[in-house]
Amino acid sequence: MFSRELWLDNEKKCAVVRKSKPGRRRQELLAVALGVKVGVKGGFLWPPLKLFACSQISSLVRRAALTHNDNHFNYEKTHNFKVHTFRGPHWCEYCANFMWGLIAQGVQCSDCGLNVHKQCSKHVPNDCQPDLKRIKKVYFCDLTTLVKAHNTQRPMVVDICIREIEARGLKSEGLYRVSGFTEHIEDVKMAFDRDGEKADISANIYPDINIITGALKLYFRDLPIPVITYDTYSKFIEAAKILNADERLEAVHDVLMLLPPAHYETLRYLMIHLKKVTMNEKDNFMNAENLGIVFGPTLMRPPEDSTLTTLHDMRYQKLIVQILIENEDVLF
């Protein structure tokens, strides 16, 4: 049993390695890192817990600070307005006033069908609810739009492909590195575009697992906005350039919080999957670095279409994905 004298003596030693933060904050962070709740009634648990964790307090507090996030994601989506000519009388769905003119009277959201004046479109909140009837394709479709239309956390392509890969392909040599037949990958793509979540990608139809991995990679490449968005691209590259490993990890975590919810959730789910792939490295010969080489350019694309920039950033793209895989349990 822990005595009070032993705890007080150890408390002095712990003070050397702890940063000068409020005691209450340290207690909360450590409790989060250990996965326990230390409230008023459970205060008697605090001394032995702190004694147990004292030798590794720095790493525990850093881990808790990275993983503890109280923000609840709100799947906001901006409207995709385009100038539209309406047939017959129309009223603005924002201000309720008549839309005058014979042609180009206003704008219409191509995702949900909202009709408003052009000037009113600047004031419409980001509350687009895409209509499935207007979503003609799965591939090439904006990630957030697809998620909102299907009312899911992630694109169903990602869920279905990853489930199939984990069911029968984790030990496949060169998983994600070896390419499948292009024609068959295109068949899978058309199946998702045509049948959606009812698409059959089972081993009976596509026995080669590399066809499924190829279809998943193609989905990410075809996104109009990459999983790691254009807005956050440069911030991730700058984070990758930080030499200190702990500071680099914290910087990557901070940038992750800037991703749109659908992008964040998709990336989180993919990294959990890729971590499972690395756990079968003895069979598939794919570690985090190898997967970083494959997925770096797939998940990250520079805003400007510059070959020179792409070549220069390739090592940082690889490093970012490698960091995300190796630290997925801390970063997400």
Image: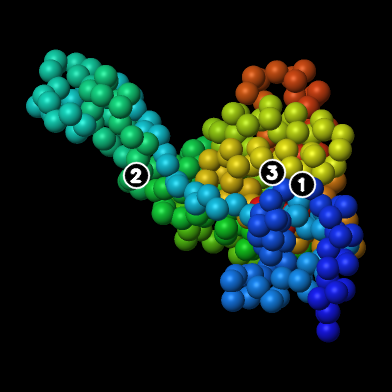
| Dots 2, 1 in contact, CB < 8 A | no
Residue 317, how many percent across, how many down? 76, 35
Mark 2 element type: loop
Marking on residue 20: 1
Dot 2, how many residues are within 10 Å of its Cα: few (below 14), some (14-19), or many (20+)? many
Asked whether residue 159 appears in the rendered view, the answer is yes
Please tell me which of labels 2 and 1 falls first in the chain: 1
Q: In the displayed structure, would residue 70 be above or below residue 10?
A: above
Marking on residue 208: none
Q: Which residue is drawn at the image coordinates 66% and 57% (left, top)?
A: 24
Marking on residue 129: 2
Which quadrant does the N terminus fall into?
Answer: bottom right
Mark 3 element type: helix
Dot 3, how many residues are within 10 Å of its Cα: few (below 14), some (14-19), or many (20+)? many
Disc 3 designates what residue? 253
Asked whether residue 137 appears in the rendered view, the answer is no
Q: Quadrant of residue 238?
A: top right
- Depth order, front residue of 56/313: 56
